[in-house]
Amino acid sequence: DAGVTQSPTHLIKTRGQQVTLRCSPISGHKSVSWYQQVLGQGPQFIFQYYEKEERGRGNFPDRFSARQFPNYSSELNVNALLLGDSALYLCASSLAGVENNSPLHFGNGTRLTVT
Amino acid sequence: DQQVKQNSPSLSVQEGRISILNCDYTNSMFDYFLWYKKYPAEGPTFLISISSIKDKNEDGRFTVFLNKSAKHLSLHIVPSQPGDSAVYFCAASAREYGNKLVFGAGTILRVKS
């Protein structure tokens, strides 16, 4: 079975530009979460979506937005890119929503470089 | 405020011996704890988890211990293998916070053959 797939794998953007990252969850998983990982740190929570509704948002500015589609895939958008947005962006899916503990399964991430 | 801490940036172990990775947390609301392994250019891979109602969970070579009074958990890998060399992340979540994971900064494990 295919795991969580993310595209693109790498991306280079200029300050001020906008970027869209895409994620397809494991088949049957209805919850998708987004995390940002900068070098030397653990992943930081950005968003969680379950059944196409936002169920949680981390401490990120409004330049970050996301959505989940009827097929449970998801997009993360970042506007007005800053140099500090350079990071590995990880998407994760899980069987359960916010009510039940279940492990997140991560994709390989999108490496975003802002110059 | 770093709620999950992995105080050892790196650990080096001989093949066949035990690897012990440690993690401390500060938020008493956390009720579910996980360990992930990450290789370069890959996403974190789920290894093992433990609920706060347990103090031990085993899966093959991997065992996680939870000491709630000390707010401490550890991952034991026995026996360690060269393929275990990776970055290990401890993570915690709380039902009240909607199950989002709070990660530690990671520990680099090197298993020498």
Image (tube, coloured by chain):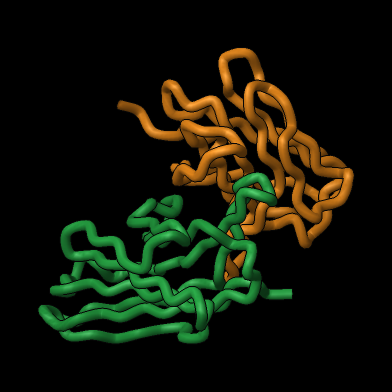
Chain colours: A orange, B green
**What number of labels is visible?**
0
- Report the residue that reaches farthest toward the top: A70
Quadrant where the image shows the C terminus of chain B? bottom left
Q: Give me the residue at 58% from left, 56% from top.
A: B93
Residue B39: image x %, image y %? Answer: 37, 60
Q: Give me the residue at 73% from left, 54% from top.
A: A114
Image position of B12 (left or right of A57): left
Image position of A56 (left or right of A8): right
Image position of A47 (left or right of B108): right
* Image: A8 above or below B23: above
* Image: A109 above or below B64: above
Quadrant where the image shows the N terminus of chain B? bottom right
Q: Give me the residue at 17% from left, 59% from top.
A: B60
Residue B7: image x %, image y %? Answer: 51, 85
Q: Name the quadrant containing residue B28.
A: bottom right
Q: Nearer the viewer, residue B103 or A20?
A: B103
Q: Name the quadrant containing residue B26.
A: bottom right
Q: Nearer the viewer, residue B41 or A12?
A: B41
Residue B73: image x %, image y %? Answer: 43, 74
* Image: B29 above or below B74: above
Image position of B58 (left or right of B67): left
Residue A88: image x %, image y %? Answer: 59, 53
Is any atom of residue B78 visible in this view?
A: yes
* Image: A83 above or below A77: below
Q: Give me the residue at 49% from left, 29% from top.
A: A25
Is any atom of residue B40 visible in this view?
A: no
